Amino acid sequence: MKLSRRLLVLLSILLSFTLIAAACGDDDGGASASSLDDSLGLVTVGSGEEIQIRSLEAITGDVAFLGIPNERGTVLAIADYGPIGGHDVNMGTGLDDLCSADGGQAAAQTIVSDESVIGVIGTSCSGAATAAAPLIAQAGMVMISGSNTSPALTSDLQGTAGENWVAGYYRTAHNDLFQGEAAATFAYDELGIRNAAAIHDGDPYTNGLASAFKNAFEAKGGEVSGFTAVNKGDTDMVPVLTEVASGSPELIFFPIFEPEGDFIAQQVGGVAGLEGVTLMAADGLLNDNYLGLPESAGMYFSGPDVRYGENTNESTGKTANDFLAAYEAAYGEVPSAPFWAHSYDATVLLLDAIKASSAEDGDSLVISRAGVREYLNGVTNFSGLIGSLSCDAFGDCGSQKITVIQDTDPTDVEGAKNNVVFEFAP
Amino acid sequence: MTAVGVRSTRRVSWVDRFLTTLRIVLIALIVVGLLAFIAQQIDNDNAFARRRNPGATGLTAAQVKGLFVTGVAQGAMYGLIALGYSMVYGVLGFINFAHGEVFMLGTMSGFIASTKLSDAGYWESNFIGSFLLIILIAILVSTATAVVMERVAYRPLRDSPRLIPLITSIGVSFFIQNAVLGLFGPNSKSYPQLPEWLAKNRTILTFDIPGTKIMVLVVAAVSMAGLWWVVERTKTGKAMRAVAEDKEIAALMGINVDRTIVLTFAIGGAMAGIGGILWGLSFRSVTHLTGFLPGIKAFTAAVVGGVGNLGGSMAGGVALGTAESLGPQVILEPLGVKGVSQLRDAVAFTALVVVLLFKPAGLFGERLSEDDRA
């Protein structure tokens, strides 16, 4: 099977060479198969065959709220984009990264065993990407994530590569290095808070963000009187809130997820010593369900700029509002996390890259793996659903802007998303 | 005495010594923690309290009472779920790990019904009526799930070794979780807000208790009383007890064993449905994974109380809920442990270990005959 495919590739390349040799001068200015960079290999999509890409997201378990909208973002982007050079794009069955390193590794091995795959959209979790990205990159494929935020996967944004960075890895999500600092700056400078508490849930992402907040807040001269964690699956938050109440904080920063974040907001009012405390969360709780909770009134949220609204993806011509309408029509619910837009843009970037680095050859399409990377490295000011995208040398393509919003009226979720009270850019 | 005999005696005594040490260490930990807590409550500048926890601030009386009340309410819900584990174990002798999902389906159906009622305006205008309606719906859904589960997954395995239905129940659990994920999506879903008159705090015996927790305690007590009446005072209950005692003899006495087993699953499911609604109204949030941790905790509660004993399951639930709520703050924090709240699950399972070390059959458990333990 494998051998015959390799043989087929070789034959079709030979065939394309002879065809080009025969029809020299037929070139109409676009790339021809012979001019493609084959340093990482070429992939030939034969007549009637589909272009293969893959989706690798956390679609089961307790991070499914993040991975499922990401996967659907990819599905809808492929549908909006349409065929490339007469070939449909096939995502296959959505793969599961299980939000863990071993899940990422297992899925990546499945992906790289199929040599026709050009690129992967995913993973949902940075932990899974650490294991998956090296395998995928080594196979000459690219990986573009819509929701990894760990600085280790790209760089510190100052020119030093992160410890897990590999060439061939890209992401449209923001680099998390600055979110903790943004939240601390907002709390200290804008709200005048001097005593804060932070609660995470043991997950590397929430722990990292809560620690970044703590360090930045203390560096500014504030006191972090409580730094603790809840367990995923906990419902009764009175004990943890009682624990932080003993330090009498003025603000609680809890960059965690639903449903634990719901319980904190609901139960904080019943804990002695926390009357009038300010609540602040991060992008993990930045979704329509949470913003619509009556208890989230007055809360602050740090995260990527989610004022997607009429932002238009320049390649598909669709706006974020078009996407949301299509999403609701297809799935009967609103997205449970804001990174669908990042995944949509990631998918379109991959498809653009395939289009730019491929050449039609009769009925088949020849795609250069090196060309795909070259295209992605050169992305500048691409207008997508999330805003303007430009890729740096370490694969950070997202807009690195952090905003803080305040949910003043839970009955108006869109209004809350637009109610930006603070912007922070490194 | 043969050499083999000597060796086995020595091995037993080594294990015994280890267990005794474990008992002493755990008890010492609890006693020292409690003493340090009392010391810090009397005066938080106390040298004894400062020794391990230099930043000791102590808790106010209101905070301690708050922790206690929240623990008891949480425990009552564990107890309601634990009844289902206990009843099935009593009758069939295996642990139905999918019971947590029966509970989750109760919470989920309550969510769907309550949002529909809320959209129609009925939730706000007639809360009592809506409450009874969603409890009824949750009971129906949970009972139906439990009955179908028994028919499809467990009855065909009735005569196989007990490990087989046990593994099957884990499979059923995954199936239900992912079916709900597929049907309703991964979003966390929120119940509508409770009316102000119910949610507001009330003062009972100097305890400032949120109304929802009073509701949980009342409904749990009523359900428990109803269950006790069914099991102890009705013919059906008598049949259930007879089947639990010995299936073959019960069959000879003219009891329809299959029907009784279905009834056991149905009643366990109904209790889980009630628990599900209480959970939904207390925490107002449900996902496809809502059943997992409460299921494990309820199973722990059933073991703590003595699996097979219904009163024991409820008592075990309340004991476990209180221990995991108070334990971190009252025992671990004074010992200088950092970030104690994330240790609540560890505290709950340590409580299980402590109980089993002193009473291997659980707090109210009876020693099972050799035959039952096979």
Image (spheres, coloured by chain):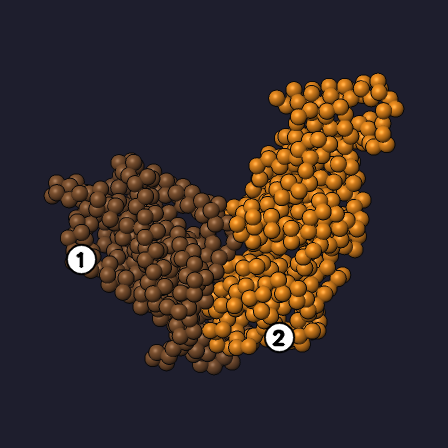
The residue that mark 1 highlights is B232
- Name the tint of chain B in the rendering: brown
Say left or right for B186 vs A19: left
Say what secondary structure mark 1 lies in.
helix
Q: Quadrant of the N terminus of chain B?
A: top left
Badge 2 marks a residue whose secondary structure is strand
* Amino acid type, callout 1: Glu
Q: Residue furthest front?
A: B120
Q: Mark 1 and mark 2: span between their CA atoms?
A: 57 Å
User: Can residue A46 be seen in the rendering of this structure?
Assistant: yes
Determine the residue positioned at 75% across, 28% down: A366
Location of residue A370 with respect to B98 vertically, above or below: above
The amino acid type, in three-letter code, at marker 2 is Asn
Question: Which circle, 1 or 2, is nearer the viewer?
Answer: 1
Q: Quadrant of residue B361?
A: bottom left
Tell me, yes or no, whether dots 1 and 2 are on the same chain. no
Q: Position of residue B121 (x, y in %)?
A: 43, 65
Q: What quarter of the picture does the C terminus of chain B occupy?
A: top left
Q: Which mark is residue A195?
A: 2
Task: Specify the colour of chain A.
Answer: orange
